[in-house]
Amino acid sequence: MALWKQKEDWTYEYFDLDEDVSTFIGAESFVELWNTKRGNRRVPRWSDYDWDDLFPWWGSLVVSDVFWEPYDYRYRLYGTNVVNKIGIDVTGKRASELIDINYVDDTEMEFYEMVGRNLHITKTSGLIRMPGREHIKETFVELPLSDTGDRATHGLALLV
């Protein structure tokens, strides 16, 4: 585990791909499934998953499509539990569109670009930035997916 940065009340951590699943409290079976899907590859592809594989976590999932040159990502899916906790549905939005409303900031963009290029598991936690929810803490475990094997093409995150 490496602590990348602490900013205000947010913590950004990244982990080797072979990190023990017990490190990810509340997401152990989610990470175990990812390990099964990747087999002997560095990371699995998004196409390795069926929706039924993810049934136990449907409402708590965030799926992202990653773009390079310039770096950005789009929220393909923002689960209902995530929407209810955070107070906004960003399904279909790009991260770069959400900077103006302070949902995403430059630190987050820099972090996800770094871990996407280097293929790390991440854990981020902090207080929700949306008005009226600043007292609620959120924690996500995110797993990289790659169609190419060299950098992330998708992200699969779980609200824990």
Image (cartoon, rainbow, N blue to C red):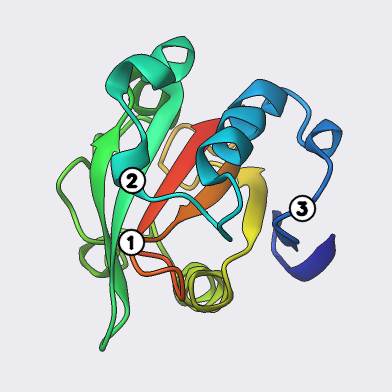
The disc, 1 or 3, on the residue closer to the chain's N-terminal end is: 3
Tag 3: amino acid? Asp
Q: Residue at x 40, y 12 (%)?
A: 55
Q: Residue at x 51, y 38 (%)?
A: 37
**Above or below: residue 79 compared with residue 150:** above
Q: Of helix, strand and loop, which one carries label 1? A: loop
Residue toward you, 103 or 53: 53
- Identify the image quadrant of the N terminus: bottom right
Report which residue position mark 2 lands on: 46
Residue 45 appearing in the image: yes
Tag 2: amino acid? Trp
Residue 139 appearing in the image: no
Mark 3: few/some/many CA within 10 Å (<14, 14-19, 20+): few
Report which residue position mark 3 lands on: 18
Q: CA distance from mark 1 to mark 3?
A: 19 Å
Residue toward you, 48 or 84: 48
Q: Of helix, strand and loop, which one carries label 2? A: helix
Kindly identify which numbered label has been placed on residue 73: none
Asked if residue 152 lies left or right of residue 14, the reply is left
Kindly identify which numbered label has been placed on residue 147: 1
